[in-house]
Image: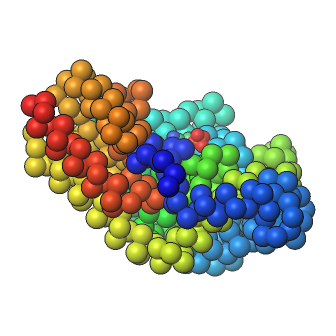
Amino acid sequence: EVNRICNFNAGPAALPEPVLQELQENVLNFQNCCMSILEISHRSNDFDNVINDAVARTKRLLGIGDNYHVLFLQGGASLQFAMIPMNFLAEGRTADYINTGTWSTKAIKEAQIQKKNFNVAASSEDRNFAYIPKEFSFNPDATFVHITSNNTIKGTQWDQFPDTGDVPLIADMSSDFMCRPIDMSKFGMIYVGAQKNIGPAGVCMVIVRDDMLKLIPDGLPTMLDYRTHVEKNSMYNTPPCFAIYTVQLVLKWLEETVGGLGEMEKINRKKAELLYAAFDESDFYKGTADLDSRSMMNVTFRLPSEELEKKFIDQAAQNGLGGLKGHRSVGGCRASIYNATTVENVEKLISFMKEFENRNK
Ligand code: PMP
């Protein structure tokens, strides 16, 4: 029996245990090719099979066809903040951004640095990003509307995506990708730092619709032009093979063990309902997000004092419950309950919370 904690980290985060076991086996001898997955060439048939299978599973899980390209890029979700305006906001174009927290703000900053035209169509900054805006004024001439589907730090999530008419959405789905089925037809592009819901750090998945590629101006640096990666199946340069392999195994787990995104959503809703019910029954723990904007993935909460928060986080860790500290920019506590977090681990957290409350209130 391996000694592992219940991991509530925000990212890198918990991975499904069967995936870790399969990785472990393939670190010595990858599918009987007598080399490690860490040692094989990205130009080999073996690796081609890995990346092609990961792409095919992504398309099946999301129900998308060949008009979408699935890419594996480096530079994290953070590089996408810069690549999006660079690729899609050529001279004369404009975009709408919705600001729902730290990561949206960073995406906006990159459009600003490049002196692109854009508007902020809505923002929840007035109440420290505790909610998802309901009122927007979209520009019908915008090339895209950018949103952050789940706000990892503030603990809020879009339940229904905004209606943008014919204007495609671009979404940073880093912290809730594949937590539920979505209607992909609204999206011109989504991007995802893998290290929360679908894999380890080191790879960013980008799913871009074919028509978006026509917006790209010539003259961009080769590595920063999406067309390079579409044409070369994410292998223009050496890709992060091990990270992509891990993503492939997580997707296989989602498809074959969980049974797809509909099943995943049921499990995720159950975990979130259990955990939020635990605060709603108590006046010791207080959620920080508005009720109608609560995230299924990152559950942010406060205790009556910072001193108690510190004690809570320390004692939880001593009891095998790790990663409960809120982001350093907001303090408090946060339990990240991504796809790989089991209902059982959430139940363990809830029983610790009850016990801690009884001892400290
Ligand atoms: N967007 C969101 C919603 C995130 O949570 C994060 C990481 N915490 C990022 C972007 C940045 O991702 P990366 O570190 O992969 O650049």
Residue 222 position, x and y percent, is 85, 47
* Residue 316 x/y as whole percent: 31, 37
**Residue 127, located in which quarter of the rendered image?**
top left
Tell me which residue sits at (10%, 49%) in the image.
Answer: 281
Q: Camera-side residue: 112 or 1? A: 1
- Colouring rule applied to residues: rainbow
Question: In terms of depth relative to the viewer, which is nearer, 17 or 273?
Answer: 17
Quadrant, the C terminus: top left
Outermost residue on the front side: it is 1
Q: Which residue is drawn at the image coordinates 69% and 53% (left, top)?
A: 243
* Residue occupying the point 33% across, 39% down: 319
Can residue 15 be seen from the camera position used here?
Answer: yes
Q: Measured along the vertical axis of the image, is residue 262 above or below residue 223?
A: below
Nearest the eye: 285 or 23: 23
Residue 311 is left or right of residue 327, and the answer is: left
Q: Taking 94 as reference, is 91 left or right?
A: right
Residue at 40%, 40% in the rendered image:
322
Rendered location of residue 273, percent (x, y):
24, 59
- State the image quarter where residue 228 is shown: bottom right
In this rendering, the count of numbered labels is 0
Above or below, comparing residue 327 to residue 76 in the picture: above
Which residue is the extreme one toward the top? 307
Tell which quarter ligand 1 is in: top right
Query: As drawn, is 258 to the left or to the right of 92?
Result: left
Q: Is residue 139 visible?
A: no
Please give left or right for residue 52 compared with residue 187 in the image: right
Q: Position of residue 29 (x, y in %)?
A: 80, 62
